[in-house]
Amino acid sequence: MIHNFYINQSFNFHFDINQDVFDLFVKLSNDCNHMHTRDDYAQQYGFEGKIMHGNILNAFISYFIGECLPVKNVVIQSQSIDFKKPVYMNTKIQLVATVDSIVESVNVVIFKFNFLNNQNVVVAKGKIQIGLL
């Protein structure tokens, strides 16, 4: 299975952050912080409007690893994400993940990734380490 991956292999996916995604995340997380739920509150702090929960992006990473790779017997061993810019409602997000390294002796693949917004600006980036079972 490790041979399904190679250094610099790239994966690209698009996700829509819309009202349905937002509502489902709030229902799941119970995170109703005003920064995420009220435009007027977020605007007081210099944002254009309510900012989307950063962990919505983590859900997209879960989908990418669990459903989009050429193999299915994988687990996330670690991941890190740095949030660079706010993401707002009705934004199309692009995930670009690239194989950064492969450790064949322990069946590990490490990806670097970026999330880009509609203007092609990096809003988050990080690393994911997966183990192939």
Image (cartoon, rainbow, N blue to C red):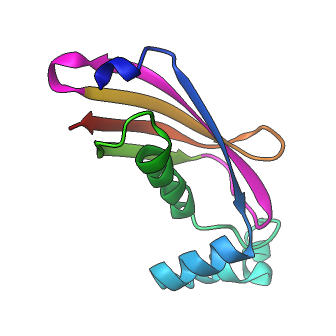
- In the rendered view, would you say 129 is above or below 31? above
Quadrant (top left, top right, bottom left, bottom right) of the N terminus: top left
Query: In terms of depth relative to the viewer, which is nearer, 73 or 100?
Result: 73
Tell me residue 101's x, y (percent): 36, 19
Is residue 25 shown in magenta?
no
User: In percent of the image, x 75 and y 39: which residue is there?
Assistant: 121
Residue numbers of the magenta segment: 84-107
Query: In terms of depth relative to the viewer, which is nearer, 93 or 86?
Result: 93
Tell me residue 71's x, y (percent): 37, 36
Q: Please indicate whether residue 94 sits to the left or right of residue 60 in the image.
A: right
User: In percent of the image, x 33 and y 36: which residue is there?
Assistant: 129
Q: Please indicate whether residue 73 sits to the left or right of residue 93 in the image.
A: left
User: In percent of the image, x 47 and y 80: which residue is there?
Assistant: 28
Quadrant (top left, top right, bottom left, bottom right) of the C terminus: top left
Q: How many numbered badges does the structure rendering display? A: 0
The answer to which quarter of the image holds residue 23 is: bottom right
User: In percent of the image, x 39 and y 38: which residue is there?
Assistant: 128
The answer to which quarter of the image holds residue 79 is: top left
